[in-house]
Image (cartoon, helix red, strand yellow):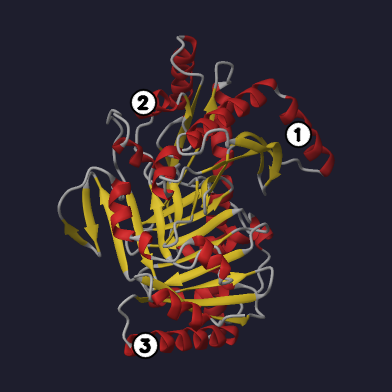
Amino acid sequence: MRKPEEWTKQWLTQYERVPLWQKIKWTSQDPWRLYKSLQKQSAYAFILESGRIGRYTYVGMDAVASLAYKNGQVSENGKSSSPVLSDPMATVRRWMGHEFSPSAGEMAQAGLPDWTGGSVGYISYDMGRYYEMLPRAAEDDLKLPDVYLMLVEQLYAFDHETGDVFIIVHVGERASLRMIEQAEKRLREMKEMLEVTKGKIEESPVLHIEEMEEDFLGEVTTSFEQADFEHAVRRVQEYIAAGDVFQVNLSVRQTRKTDAEAEEIYEVLRTINPSPYMGLIRFPEFQLVSASPELLLQVKGNRLSTRPIAGTRRRGRTEEEDAALVRELLENEKEVAEHIMLVDLERNDLGRVSRFGTVHVDELMAVEKYSHVMHIVSNVVGEMMEDKDMYDAIIAAFPGGTITGAPKVRTMEIIEELERVTRGPYTGSMCVLGFDGNAVCNIIIRTLILKDEEAHVQAGAGIVIDSTPKAEYYESLKKAEVLWKSLSLAEAKRRVEKSMREGSRV
């Protein structure tokens, strides 16, 4: 078996940016301990997990560069740059330069994980304005970038199947012997940090979080009062009756003050509601805390996949009630029809960048269960055309049809008319874009934005002709509940720990 340094030396003769790595055993098997130890050292940091189903967890910090895109204005490393560009994905493609790195196939041949470096961040729902002629009516109150990415050249990748951790840095094509030695030194430093972490973090006092107070809806303000939301639902139904659309996803944002840190909230969230596409991304100005269950797009070599979710019920209080709710959900004609319609929409989106005849559904109408809700889920796959790349695929899939409705462009126009604030990151995508051309983008739902000591949580419901306005309002609140519970428990945990510290000094 070839050593990592042998792969690196070969690639340095062919590419401009290549990985150098070490692989070691990691006995802790909890990357969260490492993240907690390291995140305070950098303004940019992330942990990307996959609940109980995924193979890899990624931890990184010390971004070598950042890119923010807003209304055509580009900011690199916090400074405005020119010229102004009208295509955000073209901007990211230029900034990333992944064509100058080893391919996904070469990385896999070397035994590397699915992602070895690239960019991490989000693409907001409002990026759709750059590719479709959409009105501007809602207030942009949070004023967050439409695209915000950090460039990552060093990271830890935890393999939960093998118990290995990959420690990865990158070097350039024209790297001198001195630069390679510096990269090797950085690998040693990162390995030392990994070893130190095993004993560095003291466990928090044992707290039975399920017994804590859960006053998580206290002093919450909303973008929609219930009566206004119900009026908007009826307006959507008028559009449906007129033949404009089949279904529209309508959402409500809730906001409240908090003194909790993003890490404190995420620590509770990952415990009570592990999800397939969850993570914490720390930017200097704000943080994203996500327990998303939904995949917008995965690009792995030439294989494309998307995993639409449509159809929701609360969890049962007993196993019997839970099973009854599953049966009721799958037998509900409205839910099934809505789900099939959105699966067809996603097939059409993938078809825009897939080879003819390759798009198909390989899993139809499974039920996935989470702490507070259950969903109907399907999986759609395709083979990407040779002249397309991950950026083309993102544009084709974006934004996800399950969080707009059908047909997509008209529903986005109606959303802009009826929702009072721009969505921002909500229903956009938290993305991992690889130097090798691979990508994973979730849909930003079940996600909390923490900015200026305010927590913002947004959730919605799919409105169809026979929707009950009151029920749709409460479904939206139910979907947000796990975030507010996590926040409330994090605040309670903080208060208890503070009291214990103060008591120990008496």
Can you identify the residue that label 3 sits on? 182
Task: Tell me if mark 1 has few (under 14), some (14-19) or many (20+) residues whose alpha carbon lies within 10 angstroms of its own.
Answer: some
Find residue 64 and report its horizontal and vertical position in percent: 33, 71
Q: Name which residue type carries label 3.
A: Gln
Circle nearer the viewer, 3 or 1: 3
Can you identify the residue that label 2 sits on? 413
Marks 3 and 2, how far apart at CA: 52 Å
Q: Name which residue type carries label 2.
A: Glu
Q: Which mark is residue 171?
A: none
Circle nearer the viewer, 3 or 2: 3
Find residue 82 and report its horizontal and vertical position in percent: 15, 54
Task: Tell me, yes or no, if residue 456 can be seen here.
Answer: no
Q: Earlier in the sequence, mark 3 or mark 2?
A: 3
Locate the N terminus and report the quarter of the image it occupies: bottom right
Marks 2 and 1, how far apart at CA: 34 Å
**Quick check: marks 3 and 1 in contact, CB under 8 Å?**
no
Q: Earlier in the sequence, mark 2 or mark 1?
A: 1
Can you identify the residue that label 1 sits on? 325
Which residue occupies 59% across, 71% down? 111
Which residue occupies 40% across, 57% down? 121
Task: Tell me if mark 2 has few (under 14), some (14-19) or many (20+) residues whose alpha carbon lies within 10 angstroms of its own.
Answer: some
Marks 3 and 1, how far apart at CA: 58 Å
